[in-house]
Image: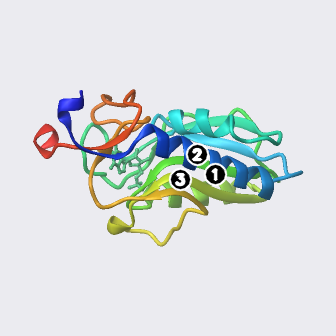
Amino acid sequence: MRADIQEILLDEEALEKRVSELGAKISEEYFGKNPILIGILKGSAVFLSDLMRKITIPVEIDFLKASSYGSAAQSCGVVQLENDLSIEVKNRTIILVEDIVDTGNTVKYLLERFSGLGAADVKICSLLNKKGRREQIVAPDYIGFEIPNAFVVGYGLDYAQKYRNLPYIGILKKEIYQ
Ligand code: 5GP
């Protein structure tokens, strides 16, 4: 798999350090609020599992499966939800945990959906932020790293379901997906 990676952007040490910082910040800012962390599958699975263990206050966990990519490296723009939540969100404090915000279509859709369901407060925590390709005016409230406009894989992020188990985040060689 390493041979398919053009460059390692974020190594294990950098990821561990930043995720710890985010966990500490969320623990401080959400003290007494009993938030629900909602992981957007499948990409945020690794981030969420590391992040939740760095949070020292009580939290609940749930998952949504959203997709806008199919098996391509370009978003098709249409967000699809493939399951629903098991926890009631009305009047609750929500933190949406994303792997990456790119066009912004996914988080825009989810923000509207949770407002519609009567959540008291909805914030976005995204490990990566790729501002260069925004189609919606949305900004994550918590950001792990700003990254350039490149297609990245690893630490939960895939290309055609591969590379999620890489322990680092790297730029995928163009010849793999072009
Ligand atoms: P958006 O709706 O903001 O365009 O994209 C959200 C989803 O697209 C992310 O949760 C992620 O699954 C996927 N995505 C966006 N950029 C990348 C990328 O560089 N690499 C991978 N593997 N997925 C991406």
Q: CA distance from mark 3 to mark 2?
A: 10 Å
| Quarter holding residue 166 | top left
Check mark 2 vs ligand 1: CB closer than 8 Å? yes or no: no
Badge 1 vs badge 2, beta-carbon distance below 8 Å: yes
* Residue under numbered circle 1: 22
Task: Tell me residue 173's x, y (percent).
Answer: 17, 43
> Vertically, is 142 above or below 167?
below
Q: Residue at x 52, y 61 (%)?
A: 108
- Which of the two residues, 172 or 160, is positioned nearer the viewer here? 172
| Colour scheme in use | rainbow
Badge 3 vs badge 2, beta-carbon distance below 8 Å: no
Can you tell which mark lies on residue 19?
A: 2
Task: Tell me residue 7's x, y (percent).
Answer: 24, 45
Can you tell which mark lies on residue 126?
A: 3
Q: Secondary structure at mark 1?
A: helix
* Residue occupying the far right of the picture: 32
Q: Residue at x 31, y 39 (%)?
A: 70
Task: Give, as a three-letter code, the residue at label 1.
Answer: Leu
Q: Earlier in the sequence, mark 3 or mark 2?
A: 2
Label 3: how many Cα within 10 Å (few below 14, some 14–19, many 20+) = many
- Which of the two residues, 8 or 98, is positioned nearer the viewer here? 8
Q: CA distance from mark 1 to mark 3?
A: 10 Å
